[in-house]
Every structure is written in structure tokens, then in C-alpha cells.
């Protein structure tokens, strides 16, 4: 009997570490996310538009009928570029025919195409508000769960918006936030409670990540504006405009130099709004930046995104303004909300970018008919390139 007791004790001691190790391994397995979840969290790969088979598949399921631009630059063939003005009439005629597309999302897509809604914050807010209306009108189909079916609906809406205009980095972060909130909805909630929760999440995201973030940026940036300063800005940034308006309301005496560039000439709208408020302004184009920079005391710039290596991703031409300011020893302040930060690393304008309408480069404002530029876009020996964004590294500034 004592020998049997000893042997049983020894076997129990041997089994104990094995049980502990199996329990630990099971715990590790349960804690490790599944392959499907990891793919869900990973950013969606950008489609290469020089892949003929993938482009043909995308055309078959596309809602927007788009014709590709001719004489494209070979280096940028992996990016989408379409003939401007061919998508909008077809979409307007289909307004009451698209059953799976919610009218609010459809309206935002039309506004993207026409250029009525532009700017990183403006496009993101318009998209989120459209999703909010779509969620409010949503009802779960029979034999389906809300989280899975609604995620599929949001994905189809996002695909439609991408067809109208490529998403900005900030919009991608907002979509990821919304899908994450949908996936984490408790199963105990009813459909009405789940929809109300998602709508409040969207309101909170807009308020905290955009509205309050802009106010915080303004409160910090206003301390950099002093009397008799000459402030330079490029293009039109909503948060930079808020800084200039707040400084004017506080009674600061300063002058603003608005630098602009073709083809969009976004600075003209900013110039008109600042002049109407009584702010002393100077307007010039980017080709005169080196001549006027000696008057400047500070440069305020907006940004579409800030990447993980410190690179600022902004409208094309921003890098030239920043480098000229750096050459003159003038401080450059970049105003960007935290929801625009991204883990991507990019050092060039080739891998990922947005190509604008190439024909606008040939159009000169104020000159309706230019004989030497007429039908130049059809010339096979000419490739037109209209880049929208350009990254620049500020680590050395």
C-alpha cells in the first residue's frame, strides 16, 4: 500500500506540469487572433490598375461607368485616371435605379465627382454623415446578423465612393473605426439600440477627432502668432483658416500671404474669405515663392496625413514651399489632426497618389480659346500628368 501511494503521488506530479503546459498552450491559442481577424484589421491592398484582369473584373461590378484617359504616363499606369466629365451624367440618370445604394451615399458620391465637397475634413464628415443616415434606415434581413450584414453594406458603400474618387487616408481611418465599432456590438443589444449606438459613435468621432481637435490645434497655434507677423500659407486649409480667423478676433496685427497654384487655385477662395473679414492679405503664385519668402516670419501649412516616419502628405507644391522656407531659415508649422495619422511609410509620389483631370492643365484661366493648345490632348506624343498629392519629409526641418 505505501509503495502504491508513492507511485500514485509521483504520477500526479508528472501529470501536473503536462496539464499546466497544455492549459498554457490552449490559453495562447485562444489569445492569438484568428487569421480572418488579422486580415480584417489589415489595410485593404490598393488595386494596381496596370493589371488588366483585375481591372476588367472591377469594371464588371462597377456602378460608375468610366472611360480611361488616353496617353497616360507609363510610370503612373498603376493609378486610376479617367476622362473627366464622363461619369457624372450617367450617375445622375441612375439616381432612382440603384436599389442597393442608399440615396445619402449616392448623393455624397455625386458631390465627390462634381467637386462640390472637397478637403480632407469636408469629405470625411460628408461620408460619415451619409453612413449615419444609411444606418438609421437600415433593417436586418431575415436569417442574417446585423454586424455581418451591415459591415458588408458599408463595404459596398465604400467601393462606390472609391469609384467616384479615391479615398483619403483620413477617410480610411474613419471607415476602419466604424467597422470596428460594428464588430464589437454586444449581441444582447436589440437592432434599434445597436443602430442608436453606432449613430452616437459617428457623432462622437466627428466631434472628438475633427471639431475638438481643430480647436486644440488653434489654441496651440495662436501662441505662435504675434503682432506685426507676416504669415504665409499655401492653398486652402480649413484649420489654418480657423487659426487666422481666431488671431484676427483676438486683435492681433498681422499680414497673410496666400500662395496659390494651378490648376485648382484653391487659395482664391481662402483669399476672398480673409479679405471680407478685414485681414490684410497678399496673393501670389507658387512660382514667386522665393521672391516673397524674405518678408515671411512663419509658415502655416495644412496636411492630408502624417505618416509613421514623419513624412507629411499634402497637396502637390507643399514640399516646394517648405523647402524654400527652410532655405530662408523660417519656421514651418504643420497643422494636422491626429485621426489623419497613418502607419504607412512613403517617400515618393509614385507608389500611391491621386491623378486629377489631365485636361485642366491645358486650360488657362481667362483665355477661352487657345489655338495652339486645341486638341493637344489627343496627340499621341504628349502625356499629361496632374498629380494631386506629394509627400515631403520634415524630419530635418
Image (cartoon, grey):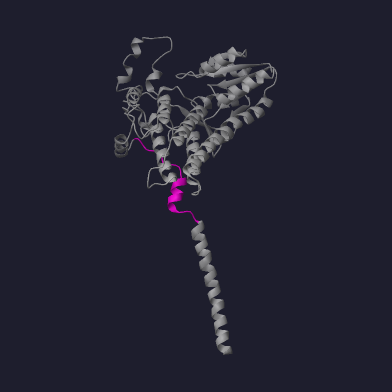
Q: Position of residue 108 (x, y in %)?
A: 43, 27
Give above or below for 254 relative to 125: above
Q: Position of residue 263 (x, y in %)?
A: 44, 19
**Total tally of numbered discs in the picture:** 0
- The quadrant of the image that shows the C terminus is top right
Q: Is there any visible trace of residue 350 in the rendered image?
A: yes
Q: Quadrant of the N terminus?
A: bottom right
Is residue 355 toward the left or the right of residue 203 in the image? left
Q: Is residue 227 magenta?
A: no
| Magenta stretch: helix, strand or loop mostly | loop
Q: Quadrant of residue 297?
A: top right
Q: Nearer the viewer, residue 152 or 377?
A: 152
Is the residue 11 above or below the residue 251 in the image?
A: below
Region of the chain picked out in magenta, as a range:
32-49
From where the camera sits, is residue 397 visible?
no
Is 253 left or right of 100, judged from the image as shown? right
Amino acid at each position: 500500500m505505501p509503495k502504491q501511494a508513492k507511485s500514485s503521488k509521483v504520477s500526479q506530479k508528472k501529470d501536473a506540469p503536462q496539464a499546466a503546459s497544455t492549459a498554457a498552450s490552449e490559453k495562447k491559442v485562444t489569445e492569438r487572433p484568428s487569421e480572418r481577424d488579422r486580415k480584417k484589421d489589415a489595410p485593404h491592398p490598393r488595386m494596381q490598375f496596370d493589371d488588366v484582369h483585375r481591372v476588367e473584373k472591377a469594371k464588371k461590378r462597377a456602378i460608375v461607368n468610366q472611360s480611361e484617359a488616353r496617353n497616360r504616363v507609363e510610370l503612373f499606369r498603376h493609378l486610376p485616371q479617367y476622362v473627366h466629365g464622363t461619369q457624372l451624367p450617367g450617375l445622375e440618370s441612375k439616381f432612382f435605379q440603384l436599389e442597393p445604394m442608399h440615396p445619402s451615399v449616392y448623393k455624397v458620391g455625386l458631390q465627390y465627382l462634381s467637386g462640390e465637397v472637397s478637403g480632407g475634413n469636408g469629405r470625411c464628415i460628408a461620408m460619415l454623415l451619409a453612413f449615419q443616415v444609411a444606418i438609421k434606415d437600415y433593417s436586418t434581413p431575415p436569417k442574417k446578423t446585423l454586424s455581418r450584414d451591415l459591415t458588408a453594406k458599408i463595404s459596398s458603400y465604400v467601393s462606390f465612393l472609391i469609384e467616384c474618387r479615391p479615398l483619403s487616408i483620413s477617410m480610411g481611418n474613419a471607415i476602419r473605426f466604424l467597422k470596428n465599432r460594428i464588430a464589437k456590438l454586444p449581441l444582447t443589444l436589440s437592432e434599434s439600440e445597436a443602430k442608436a449606438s453606432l449613430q452616437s459613435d459617428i457623432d462622437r468621432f466627428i466631434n472628438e477627432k475633427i471639431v475638438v481637435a481643430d480647436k486644440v490645434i488653434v489654441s496651440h497655434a495662436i501662441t505662435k502668432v504675434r503682432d506685426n507677423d507676416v504669415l504665409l500659407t499655401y492653398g486652402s486649409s480649413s484649420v489654418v483658416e480657423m487659426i487666422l480667423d481666431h488671431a484676427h478676433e483676438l486683435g492681433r496685427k498681422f499680414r497673410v500671404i496666400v500662395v496659390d497654384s494651378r490648376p485648382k487655385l484653391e487659395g482664391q477662395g481662402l483669399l476672398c474669405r480673409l479679405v471680407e473679414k478685414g485681414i490684410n492679405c497678399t496673393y501670389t503664385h507658387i512660382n514667386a515663392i522665393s521672391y516673397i519668402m524674405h518678408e515671411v516670419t512663419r509658415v502655416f501649412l495644412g496636411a492630408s496625413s502624417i505618416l509613421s516616419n514623419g513624412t507629411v502628405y499634402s497637396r502637390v507644391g507643399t514640399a516646394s514651399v517648405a523647402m524654400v522656407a527652410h532655405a530662408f531659415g523660417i519656421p514651418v508649422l504643420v497643422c494636422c489632426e491626429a485621426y489623419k495619422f497613418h502607419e504607412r511609410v512613403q517617400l515618393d509620389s509614385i507608389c500611391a497618389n491621386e491623378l486629377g483631370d489631365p485636361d485642366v492643365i491645358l486650360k488657362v484661366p481667362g483665355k477661352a480659346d487657345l489655338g495652339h493648345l486645341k486638341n493637344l490632348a489627343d496627340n499621341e506624343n504628349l502625356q499629361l500628368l496632374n498629380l494631386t498629392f506629394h509627400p515631403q519629409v520634415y524630419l530635418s526641418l
